[in-house]
Amino acid sequence: MTEEEILAEFRASKALLEGHFLLSSGRHSAHYLQCARVLMDPMRAGRLATAMVAKIPRELRNAIDVVVSPAMGGVIIGHEAGRALDKVAMFLERPEGTFHLRRGFALEPGQKVLMVEDVVTTGQSSREAMKAIAEEGGETIAAASLVDRSGGEVSFDVPFFPLIGFNFPSYAEDELPAELAEIEAIKPGSRKN
């Protein structure tokens, strides 16, 4: 899938929003990628996941035992990545603020995990997810995401394979440009803490 084809999928689903958004990372942005919209069409979600998984080198793909995603945003793309890899997909939840496997999900000791996110900005949620995977007995050997909006700045202790990078500026509360500060911020994501 070319970058233009990927962008066409986002445009067609009206997944790129403009305004003033408070991101789950705590930063502010004039742009928000509503990946739930781009993933609401199962055929589109499957195409995007297949293209994302194709970016992972074959040797690494072959080593993956299971796909694990943080809820909520990573659930659909993680499931579709599992389908593309023909591997089991499960998700982590944080009902009390810390990620854990629930619903009968469990990792076998030493299972090789692909951790899949929808959007990575600072990498905070991904790192928390990888820590939980280790605590659950798995070994994260790679991370993937639908979108990297870090400008290529995020890094993990494992290889990272985003489908596409969007480099929209984000700002700390005390760095807001005047035009953004004049607009009331909304928090469209699923993470409320």
Image (tube, rainbow, N blue to C red):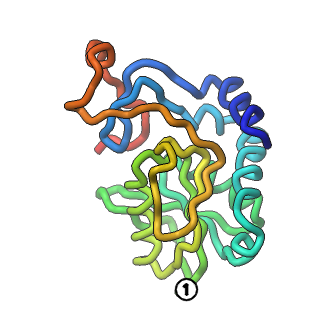
Quadrant for the N terminus, please: top right
**Quarter occupied by residue 169:** top left
Give coordinates of residue 19: x percent, y percent. Answer: 42, 18
Up-down: is 31 above or below 133?
above
Q: Is 130 positioned to the left or the right of 86 in the image?
A: left
Give coordinates of residue 53: x percent, y percent. Answer: 72, 57
- View extreme (bottom): residue: 109
Residue 130, can we see it?
yes
Give coordinates of residue 42: x percent, y percent. Answer: 74, 41
**Quarter occupied by residue 48:** top right
Q: Is 127 positioned to the left or the right of 2 in the image?
A: left
Quadrant for the C terminus, please: top left
Viewer-nearest residue: 172 or 119: 172
Residue located 41% across and 62% down the image: 127
Give coordinates of residue 85: x percent, y percent. Answer: 75, 64
Residue located 75% across and 47% down the image: 46
Up-down: is 7 above or below 20?
below
**Quarter occupied by residue 34:** top right
Q: Is 86 positioned to the left or the right of 163 in the image?
A: right
Say which amino acid is labelled 1: Gly
Residue 101, can we see it?
no
Residue located 54% across and 78% down the image: 107
Q: What is the secondary structure assignment of the residue under circle 1?
A: loop
Viewer-nearest residue: 190 or 62: 62
The residue wearing badge 1 is 110
Up-down: is 84 above or below 134?
above
Few, some or many residues within 10 Å of mark 1 (<14, 14–19, 20+): few
- View extreme (left): residue: 174
